[in-house]
Amino acid sequence: MHAHARSPRPASPLPGAVPRVTVVLMPMRRTRMTPRLAPDTSSRKPYRMGMVESEARKALARLQRSLEKTRRELEALSGAIRHAEGDEYPEHRYAEARTHVETVLDFTREESERLQAKILETGGLEPGRVRRSSSL
């Protein structure tokens, strides 16, 4: 018998050893592709917000909450430094920082409104005609 020849019996696996598995790849069955027709827009179905729009709205909401917290923390810091430094308090620097935070907050609000209008238009609704109902 050759030194490299395999024995007809496989060796018993050691405890905890992973047995060998042979994977055979088979060709996939081919199916005929049928052309799809354009969707019927005469009877619009309710639009369901997609994952991308949902994630964008969630990200905007998270950013708005963090900016609102930043605004509160900036005010707390401003008060503490004003108390500690008195006349040497750099009022103009804190006013400038507040302006930057407010600018980004305004941007997130505008983006939120723009995204909501886009979602409503895609669903076949006019953005100005939709009101929230408290009874769902």
Image: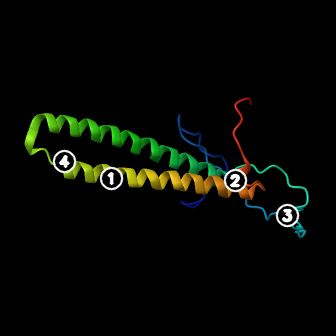
Q: What residue type is labelled 3?
A: Arg
Q: Position of residue 31 (x, y in %)?
A: 88, 66
Picture quadrant where residue 79 is located? top left
Residue annotated with mark 3: 29
Identify the element where label 3 is drawn: loop
Q: What residue type is labelled 1?
A: Thr
Classed neighbour count for the residue bearing mark 2: other residues with Cα under 10 Å, few (<14), some (14–19), many (≥20): some
Identify the element where label 4 is drawn: helix
Residue annotated with mark 2: 127
What is the spatial separation of the Cα atoms under label 2 and label 3, in whole angstroms?
A: 47 Å
Q: In which quarter of the image is the C terminus?
A: top right
What is the spatial separation of the Cα atoms under label 1 and label 2, in whole angstroms?
A: 30 Å
Q: Which of marks 4 and 3 is in front?
A: 4
Horizontal side of 103 relative to 117 (left or right) equals left
Classed neighbour count for the residue bearing mark 3: other residues with Cα under 10 Å, few (<14), some (14–19), many (≥20): few
Identify the element where label 1 is drawn: helix
